[in-house]
Image: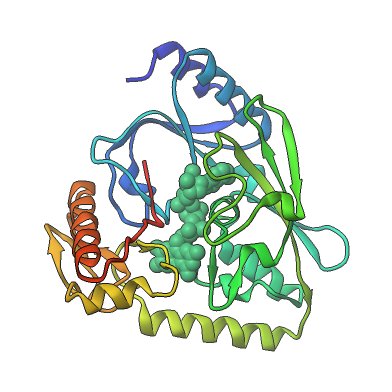
Amino acid sequence: MLDQELLNYISVQDADVFPDEPMSQHTSFRIGGAADCFCEVKNIKALKNIIDACREYNVPWYVIGLGSNLLVSDDGIRGVVIKLGGDFNEIETVGENCIRCGAGVSLAGVCVYARNNSLGGAEFAWGIPGSVGGAVYMNAGAYGGEIKDIVISSRYLDEEGNVCELTGKAQDFSYRHSAYCGRNVVILDAVFELYPKNKNEILFLMQDTMEKRRKKQPLNRPSAGSVFKRPEGYYAAALIEQCGLKGVSVGDAQVSEKHSGFIVNNGKASAKDVKELIEKVRSVVRSKTGVELECEIRFM
Ligand SMILES: Cc1cc2nc3c(=O)[nH]c(=O)nc-3n(C[C@H](O)[C@H](O)[C@H](O)COP(=O)(O)OP(=O)(O)OC[C@H]3O[C@@H](n4cnc5c(N)ncnc54)[C@H](O)[C@@H]3O)c2cc1C
């Protein structure tokens, strides 16, 4: 339970506030107990105020995007979960071929905006069900493209509440990693540099990417995408399949029959089921192949 005074303060900010909000409604896995307080903030001022208040009351806070890479505990989250809405959902053209996208914008929104403006380069992101904030944080990528290929700068709220900016190499992107990982900061927006391209060519590439996803991924079941990072020199899904783990389940959590790198929720899977299954997969793969699988999904 959150301190009532803190809850009252948060409730008068420019934010939609939901006490005891089930996180299963905010994760693509459809798993997770209640957060003491879930709020969708509309602008930087509200964001700052809420974080400052959490610090003052010594209450932990967390920022999430579209929850497509998260496994939230069945016991929920003690503290405040922040999602970026309102102003953070805006996209604007800034200079030639560049667009500034709020951290709350979905990657689908970025792709559609780019296509409507005949700008190429973002097509790889079509079908990644995350937000700009989550994608920059994770350096999301697919089909030969990564966020790092198109981001020229990103702004964030630092640990002291200052708006700061990182440009180019300072963003320290590598495979599923950015300079933001492990820091208690909020990515506010990012500038993507694209290039002029024929709308039909963009559309064709987007459709082709989605077709590949439909063929290979279990998109009809809740999941958080690939559970494991790609181990150097291997494919996680191939190793898992080779070890006979395809289709193995714990409760309603199952290693997907369609793509062994995914764990799907067949109905009522708990976070505990998913964690147990992850440990089972890691342990069998370790003992049969000597490869240590590292999780790509984030635990909350
Ligand atoms: C069906 C499916 C397919 C997928 N395919 C791919 C794929 O092809 N490639 C790929 O890379 N990923 C893929 N994913 C995983 C996921 O979509 C990406 O990792 C995505 O970038 C996560 O974005 P999100 O907004 O959902 O972030 P969340 O899952 O909400 O959060 C992920 C992390 O980012 C942090 N974060 C989010 N927003 C901010 C912010 N504004 N400031 C600071 N930190 C923030 C969170 O604290 C958390 O640690 C897939 C997932 C699913 C379900």
Q: Quadrant of the C terminus?
A: top left
- On the image, the x and y values in percent for residue 107 come to 58, 63
Return the residue found at the far front. 290
- On the image, the x and y values in percent for residue 26 come to 39, 48
Q: Tell me which residue sits at (56%, 51%) in the image.
A: 137
Q: Is residue 165 visible to the viewer in this orientation of the structure?
A: yes
In the drawing, does residue 221 fall left or right of residue 138? left
Q: Is residue 87 above or below residue 119?
A: above
Return the residue found at the far right. 95
- On the image, the x and y values in percent for residue 215 come to 37, 85
Q: Quadrant of residue 173?
A: bottom right
Q: In this view of the protein, which residue sits in the foreground, 161 or 16?
A: 161
In the drawing, does residue 2 fall left or right of residue 120? left
- On the image, the x and y values in percent for residue 58 come to 46, 16
Q: Is residue 27 above or below residue 8?
A: below
Q: Quadrant of the N terminus?
A: top left
